Image: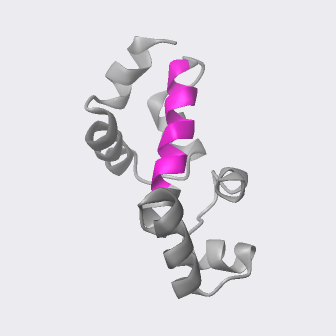
């Protein structure tokens, strides 16, 4: 989780996580699946979205800024992904507050 957070605003994928962890792709897949129940790519996306949720709740940044800060290059994809995970758009999520 810390490695993913460290690379939040960068392009960071499963291969990068494998290299950072010093593990093969299959070993990483098996370990992440056993610990989280998710694939490594889903795990990376979920960590990014949880951090994005915190940023949105802080009401300090726009949705586009949070999208960029959390490593999503396409704000529309970011909005769809947030809606799929949390059931509301980033704009509505932002209005929930803490």
The residue sitting at 51% across, 39% down in the picture is 50
Is 55 covered by the magenta stretch?
yes
Side of 15 relative to 19 (left or right): left
The relative height of residue 70 versus residue 88 in the rendered view (above or below) is below
The relative height of residue 60 versus residue 75 in the rendered view (above or below) is above
- x then y, percent, for residue 14: 54, 73
- x then y, percent, for residue 68: 54, 45
Secondary structure character of the magenta stretch overall: helix
Q: Is residue 39 or residue 72 the one in the foreground? A: 39
The residue sitting at 38% across, 46% down in the picture is 78
Q: Residue furthest front?
A: 34
Q: Is residue 62 or residue 17 the one in the foreground? A: 17
The relative height of residue 69 versus residue 98 in the rendered view (above or below) is below
Badge count: 0
Is 63 covered by the magenta stretch?
no
Side of 71 relative to 37 (left or right): right
Q: How is the image coloured?
A: one colour
The residue sitting at 64% across, 75% down in the picture is 16
Task: Give the extent of the magenta segment.
Answer: 45-57
Side of 72 relative to 20 (left or right): left
């Amino acid at each position: 989780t810390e490695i993913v957070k460290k690379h939040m605003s960068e392009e960071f994928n499963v291969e990068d996580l494998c290299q950072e962890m010093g593990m093969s792709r299959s070993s990483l897949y098996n370990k992440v699946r056993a610990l989280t129940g998710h694939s490594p790519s889903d795990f990376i996306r979920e960590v990014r979205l949880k951090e994005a949720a915190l940023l949105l709740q802080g009401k300090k940044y726009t949705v586009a800024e949070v999208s960029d800060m959390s490593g999503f290059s396409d704000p529309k994809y970011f909005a769809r992904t947030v809606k799929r995970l949390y059931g509301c758009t980033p704009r509505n999520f932002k209005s929930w507050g803490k």
